[in-house]
Amino acid sequence: MRKNLVLISLSAGLFLTLLATLTIGPIRIPFGTVVKILFSKIIPIPQTWPNNFYEIIINVRLPRILLGILIGGALSVSGCAMQGLFRNPMASPYVCGVASGGAFGASLIIVLGLPQVLIMPVAFLFSLLVVFLVYHLAKIGRRIPVETLLLSGIAFSLFFSALTSFIQYVAEEGQLRQIIFWLMGGLWASNWNKVLSVFPVIFLGILCLLYFSRELNILLLGEDHALDVGVDVENARKIILILGALTTSSAVATCGIIGFVGLIVPHLMRIIIGPDHRFLLPASCLCGSIFLVWVDTFARTLISPTELPVGIITALIGVPFFLFLLRRRKRLSGF
Amino acid sequence: MELKVLDLSFFYNSVKALEEVSLEVRGGEVLGIIGPNGSGKTTLLKCMNRKLNPKMGVVLIEGKNILGMSRKEIAKNIGFVPQLSSISFPFTVFDIVLMGRYSHTKGFRREREEDLSITQKCLELTGIKHLSKRFITEISGGEYQKVIIARALAQEPKVLLLDEPTLHLDMNHQIEILDLVKNLAQRKRLVVAMVLHDLNLAARYSDKILILKKGKIFASGLPEEVLNMKNIEEVYGIEVEISRSNKNGFLNIIPISARKKL
């Protein structure tokens, strides 16, 4: 029941995060006004605020925060699922090639001077393409040994990173800057369009991953245990890998490569709530959302009016935290 | 209830590990599988629940071939207790046993009342009800083995396969585990086949014995028929002395000396 309590607290935390971060920005908008503006969409409330407040809340901050919630949840859930699936604390969809594939796709569009709208779909397709290559190279007969999968992921990641470096090398000054910004990842160019276009994939992806929590629990014990109790190991691995890749690819395609969220958040939750994916996955999802929204809030206000790339802050917070985790007893997390 | 294995053969790449093994066990019976290291005992057990895919042969449970079933269907028919398994993640004992219900739950549905009550019953049957809230990572080896047996029982199988369930356990826990297995076989009319290293334990707990040598059946039958000096010497290459206990009539097999190279 402690676990349910954690989930309820996290849900409440996410809701409060949403309201609190809406008030924060170069222009401080009081909490009461934020609530009124939000409700004015649903029920008529006499307008007592300047017009630009409405614009800031509804069209600038709200989509950005919602996108943060989606991306944070997507990265954390798929990170968590991959760590469980591979029984490896360092595993993530990025390691399977999602990040390097997306980076290559986006850089390619930028350097070729093609329309910006193509960046998202092409990055998405390249992410999936690389995962597909990684998967098929690692496959031996019907079996996919975990070690081979991780190694082939690392190999393909290096290969595509090299291609991306080459693109950066030949890119012009302006393009280079754009590529670097994309690679660092961030929520800066958020708008309702982006929110609505990633929502279906991420929402469904997360739901499907949650659906496989019992399989993930059993797979965590090892292949032998899983076969004994009746899990079709190869099939389950394939499906969970595809779901993780789809979810993460759409996150990467929208916001670039935001590191560490998918790595730290699941580990933190594992220490608090244990290895049971029925609780761990939703907890990671909620915590990932809260984490990314707050980090992004710092990123956009810390040295305002300029913005910091959110990836820099996640790494700056992530690395010390990760070192702390390394020193922690593994009693509650199992890793 | 009946388990039949017919002409099972298996190769590791091109090395023959099992050659036309056939056997038959009825409900309530315990089959002990013995033989020296590398004789194919574990391979035979793994082929029987299709963890390994046999090249030839069939495994029939009540006339239905296991080798054509889905993983879930196999789990509903066969419970498997692997050799020297371990779990390093802190799940509770209850949750581990509940995983045995996996093959009976489907789709989006959560575990039903029935699954929880069967889990509870299996914990009681194996005498570990008091451990149900403990972490699997924080219990003893003997207790762990009972958890794995309870999980296999939660699958409500017709057949229970055990691969050296007493390895690395103390004498008292060995007896406890094997008493439990024997008891379950009789009470639930389960077909039990287990691989054992210890010939004394095999003699004591098996209704039938199967001796494997280099992937082939060397001998099979009642323990007192099969476990004689001549067979043991030929299979293990060691001279033994066999007597009967005055207390309970169990066979005592004591090694004397190594006699010849195999």
Image: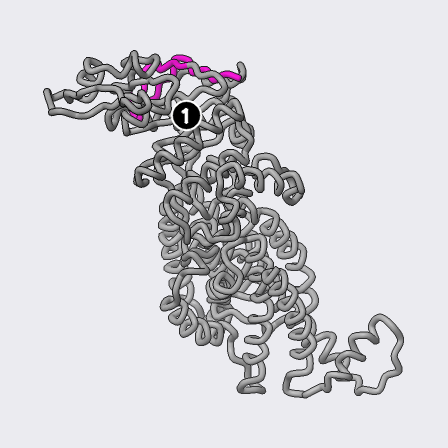
| Residue A165 x %, y % | 39, 64
The answer to whether residue A137 is seen in the rendering is no
Q: Residue at x 28, y 26 (%)?
A: B200
| Residue A146 x %, y % | 40, 46
Query: On the rendered structure, is B116 left or right of A321?
Result: right
Kindly state the secondary structure of the residue where label 1 is placed.
loop
Q: Residues within 10 Å of mark 1 (few under 14, many from 20)?
A: some
Above-or-below relation of A332 to B158:
below
Q: How many marks?
A: 1
Where does the magenta region start and end?
B1-23
Q: Residue at x 60, y 35 (%)?
A: B104
| Residue annotated with mark 1 | B53
Q: Amino acid at mark 1?
A: Asn
Indicate whether residue B175 is drawn in magenta: no
Indicate whether residue B22 is drawn in magenta: yes
Q: Residue at x 53, y 87 (%)?
A: A303
| Residue B142 x %, y % | 38, 42
| Residue B67 x %, y % | 48, 22
